Every structure is written in C-alpha cells, then in structure tokens.
Amino acid sequence: MTYDRLVCANCAGPVSEGRCRVCRANRERLQQEGPLGGLSPMALLTMIVVLLAAVAFVAVQQTA
C-alpha cells in the first residue's frame, strides 16, 4: 500500500501531507522500504514461483 492513501491515527490527516511527526516518520519509513516493501511474504513467494515457471517454460520451448 502506498502512503498517499493512508490516514494517520495521530492527527487524522493523510500521511502523504506529513502534518505531524508520526505522519512524517511513517512517510519516511514507507519511502525507504521501496516498491516491494509492502508486499506480504506469500505474495513475494507467489511472484518467485511464477517467475521460475516462466523461465522453465521458456527453456523447454527453446530446446524443442
């Protein structure tokens, strides 16, 4: 989830605006995590399995 849709529990404002120190801290943390930081471990595992299946499929197609 991106921080532009989050609402701060401290000031009830959008986290993206950074109205209070809690908003600013959470916004900074979300920015440091990167694009895959919000994904669950199960979603990451699923992405890896799909990638491996695609690589295996391409490898089989090239040998045939």
Image (spheres, rainbow, N blue to C red):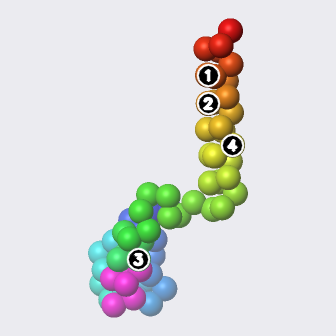
Q: Which residues are magenta?
A: 21-26
Q: Secondary structure at mark 4?
A: helix
Horizontally, residue 25 falls left or right of residue 62, namely: left
Q: Is residue 13 visible?
A: no
Q: Secondary structure at mark 1?
A: helix
Q: Are marks 1 and 2 in contact (CB under 8 Å)?
A: yes
Q: Amino acid at mark 1?
A: Val
Q: Amino acid at mark 3?
A: Arg
Residue 60's image quarter? top right
At horizontal 65% and vertical 13% (from top left) the residue drawn is 63
Q: Are marks 4 and 2 in contact (CB under 8 Å)?
A: no
Q: Which residue is mark 3?
A: 29
Residue 34's image quarter? bottom left
Alpha carbon distance from label 3 to label 4: 28 Å
> 61 or 9: nearer the eye?
61
Q: Which residue is mark 1?
A: 58
**Dot 4 alpha-carbon crowd within 10 angstroms: few under 14, some 14 to 19, many 20 or more:** few
Taken as a whole, is the magenta stretch helix, strand or loop?
A: helix
Q: Which residue is mark 2?
A: 55
Question: Which comes before the other along the chain, label 1 or label 3?
Answer: 3
Residue 5 highlighted magenta (yes or no)? no
Question: Which comes before the other along the chain, label 3 or label 4?
Answer: 3
Q: Are marks 2 and 3 in contact (CB under 8 Å)?
A: no
Residue 35, numbered circle: none
Front disc: 1 or 4 = 1
Alpha carbon distance from label 1 to label 3: 38 Å
Front disc: 4 or 2 = 2
Q: Is residue 34 above or below residue 46?
A: below
Q: Is residue 30 above or below residue 41?
A: below
Residue 23 highlighted magenta (yes or no)? yes
Question: Which comes before the other along the chain, label 4 or label 2?
Answer: 4
